[in-house]
Amino acid sequence: MRRALVTGESGFIGTHLVDALRGENTKVVTLGRRKSADGNHVYLEPGEWNGDRLAKILEFARPDAIFHLAGAARGTAEELLAINAGLTRALLLGIERAGLSPVVISAGSAAEYGAAIKDGEPVTEDASCEPLAAYGISKLAQTMEVLDFGARRSVPVLAARIFNAIGPGMPRHLALGDFAYQIAAAPRQGRFRLSVGNLETRRDMIDVSHVALVLSRLARQPDARGIVNVCSGVAPRLRSLVDTLISASGRDVVIDVDPSRLRPNELAIIVGSTDRLSKLNCSPPPTDFPALVESIWRFVERPVPVVS
C-alpha cells in the first residue's frame, strides 16, 4: 500500500491510524473538517462533502486504500443516520465518479450487533444484527451501504466492526475517558468522589494503537473482505481498569455509583470473536491493560500549553 486516504483523521482512532500508516512509509492524504497547514490534508466545508467534490479529491490522491473513519457517535437518530450513512454514501459516490477501485475500509461498531449478543459468548461476524440504539442503527446502515457498493461495483470493501478502543486521547463520552477527566479536573488535595455506573461489567477492550495496526494489516490482506471484528477477544472487568486509573492518578478517590448511570438489563460480559482476524493473520498483539490505562492518565494529566 503506497497511498492511503483517511477520513476523520483528527478523531481518536484516526490520529493513531495516520501515525501508523506514515510509520509504514505510506503516503497519507487526510480529509475532514479540521483546518491544517499540512499539504496532505484536505479541508472540507460542511456543504462540500458530496460526490462531485470527493471525486476530485480522490482523482488527486489516487489512494490504494481508503479508511473511512469520519462520523458521529452522539446526536439525534436523524442526525446520526444522516452523518454516518450519509457521509458514507457520498464518499462511495465519489469513488464511483472518480472511476477508482481502492480497498475501502469502513469503521463500523460492535453496537451494530445489539440484541444479537449473548452474555459471555464471543460474538461472531455471522450474528444477526439487532441494534438497540440510534448509534448502532446508523452504523449498521453505514455498513450496509459499503457492502452493497462492493457487491454492485466489484470494489474490495471491508466493514471493520470495532469494539471498545481505549488509549491516550480517548474522548470524554467513553467511560474510561470520562473517569480520567473527572479525576484530572478535581482538586489535587482532599478526597474526590468519582461518579460511575456499573463497574462490574466486562467488555472487550482493545488498545487503540492495536486498532490502527489491525486496520492497516487488513487493508493489505487480499482475503479480508466483508465484515471483520476488530477486537482483542479479552474482556477485563471495568472495575479493575478504574482501580488502575485511580492508582496512576495518585489521588484520594472514592467510587460513587450514580443510579442515573446504571443501565437496565445490562449484559455482564460482551466479548468479540477473534477467529476471523486470526484466520487472516491480523490478530492484535496482547494488551498490557495496566500500562495502557496509565498512558490514558498521563495524556489527560499533561500540561495544557498557554497561548500568549
Image: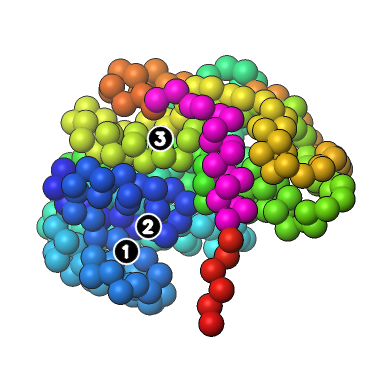
Q: How far across and down, in percent of the image, does residue 138 sit?
A: 51, 50
Span highlighted in magenta in the image: 285-302
Q: Nearer the viewer, mark 1 or mark 3?
A: 3
* Three-letter code for the amino acid on which mark 3 is drawn: His
User: Mark 3 — residue?
Assistant: 210
User: For numbered disc 1, what is the local secondary structure?
Assistant: strand
In the rendered view, does 210 fall on the left or right side of 28?
A: right
Q: Dot 1 corresponds to which residue?
A: 31
Q: Which residue is label 2 attached to?
A: 9
Q: Is residue 268 above or below residue 58?
A: above
Residue 102: in sight, yes or no? no
Residue occupying the point 72% across, 32% down: 243
Q: In the rendered structure, does residue 301 fall within the stretch colored magenta?
A: yes
Instruction: Measuring from the top left, give residue 238's x and y in whole percent.
Output: 68, 31
CA–CA distance in space, label 1 to label 2 = 7 Å
Mark 1 touches mark 2? (CB < 8 Å): yes
